[in-house]
Image (cartoon, rainbow, N blue to C red):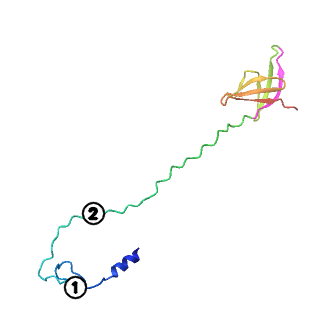
Amino acid sequence: MSGSLSALNAYAGPGPELDLVAFGDTTTTAAPAPPATAAPPTTTAAPTTTVAPTTTTAPPPPPRMAAPPPPYIPPPFKAFRYEGFSVNRGSGKLLGSISESGNTYKVSEGDCVMGQYCITRLTEKDIEIEDLQLKRKQTFTRAQQ
């Protein structure tokens, strides 16, 4: 488009140049020089305001959703080992021996160990321990020696 604009500016057109200030005289080829003593004409033009060209921009992309958090995986149950059992002669109550990390506990049904693990069932074959904080149970079979 700028190529066609420069071609238009270079076009002189047919015939002599016209002076648009001198209305009746069309034969002059150049505009008369202004008088040397005359003051330049003063015009009161309306104030011009420049308007910045508007640019179209794409709307901002939608906010990215964060990845959902990973599912909750509870910590593993303590590695208890059911060592053995004995029977109380007087009451006939079963007593069990469990160990965890080198500590040995003598327990019976209803006892709690480490303030968090309670013995819910005790038999000669296995022991069931409930984790009170995580609300889950696990059964441990008696270790064979």
Q: Quadrant of the N terminus?
A: bottom left
Mark 2 lies on a secondary structure that is loop
Does 141 appear above or below 88? below
The range drawn in magenta is: 79-89
Observer-side mark, 2 or 1, equals 1
Give the amino acid type for the residue marked by disc 1 in the picture. Answer: Ala
Front residue (pair 83, 48): 48
| 2 or 1: tag closer to the N-terminus | 1
Give the amino acid type for the residue marked by disc 2 in the picture. Answer: Thr
Given the current orientation, which residue lies at the most extreme right position? 145
Q: Name which residue lies at 13% across and 77% down.
A: 39
Mark 1 lies on a secondary structure that is loop
Q: Which mark is residue 30?
A: 1
Q: Which residue is mark 2?
A: 49
Residue 93 percent coordinates (x, y): 80, 17
Q: Quadrant of the C terminus?
A: top right
Q: Residues within 10 Å of mark 1 (few under 14, many from 20)?
A: few
Q: Name which residue lies at 18% across and 78% down.
A: 21
Is 130 on the left-hand or right-hand side of 29?
Answer: right
Residue 37 percent coordinates (x, y): 11, 81
